[in-house]
Amino acid sequence: MQTAPAYRREAGLTLVEVLMVVFIIGLVTGVAVMTLPERQDPYKKALADVQDTIDAIRDRSIMTGEVLGLSIDDNRIAVVSWTGTEWQPTGRAAFNLPAHAELEIVRERADTGGADVPSVIIFNPLGVTEPVRLDLHAGPMTFALRLNENGELVDAHEG
């Protein structure tokens, strides 16, 4: 008498098991992507860096009694200190603007008498500075920063 052969299950995964694994991998990937920080526009980061630097210079000038300046040369922004005869770099590192970005100082008063206006914004320890507008030309956009006579940024808007 012959017995029927025992039913053998083939080795491998069923379609349902494969679909569950793909679903779990997709779910984990989706959660990981959603937790990544948003990619910041380099021009908006440059704008934020300029704003932070201006606030830091103003505060440092008032707290330490130093005459400080924001120097802009060839898209390089540096913090400088007045020694009584010349501007010297401070310990704060300068930073460069991203490619295709340019920072322009627009003086509020045009009474320079034809003299060459320095590219330094001066911050007095009394909290007084010359009102200026800084235009950050960044690619197709222009951001305008207005600095009032107290050295405070009163508005920043995209133009």
Image (spheres, helix red, strand yellow):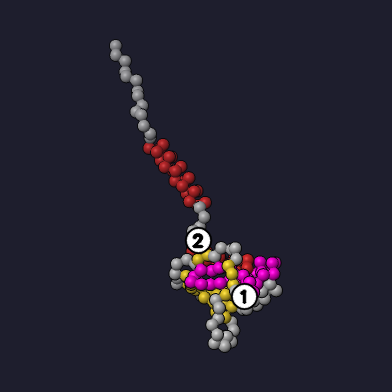
Rendered position, 2 above or below 24: above
Residue 47, how many percent across, how many down? 54, 68
Task: Mark 1: give few (<14), some (14-19) or many (20+) Cα within 10 Å.
Answer: few
Residue occupying the point 67% across, 76% down: 128
Structural distance between the alpha carbons of marks 2 and 1: 41 Å
Three-letter amino acid code at the position of disc 1: Thr
Residue furthest to the left in view is 1
Residue occupying the point 38% across, 37% down: 15
Residue that numbered label 2 is attached to: 40
Q: Quick check: is 138 in the magenta stretch? A: no
- Considering depth in this image, is 117 or 46 the residue closer to the camera? 117
Question: Does residue 19 appear to the left or right of 120 in the view shown?
Answer: left
Question: Does residue 52 appear to the left or right of 26 in the view shown?
Answer: right
Evaluate whether residue 153 shows in this view: no
Task: Mark 2: give few (<14), some (14-19) or many (20+) Cα within 10 Å.
Answer: few
Residue occupying the point 32% across, 19% down: 5
Where disc 1 sits, the SS reads loop
Magenta stretch in the rendered image: 58-84
- Considering depth in this image, is 43 or 33 the residue closer to the camera? 43
- The numbered dot on residue 85 is 1
Residue 87, how many percent across, how many down? 59, 72
Three-letter amino acid code at the position of disc 2: Gln
Residue 56, how many percent across, how many down? 63, 66
- The numbered dot on residue 71 is none
Residue occupying the point 65% across, 69% down: 58
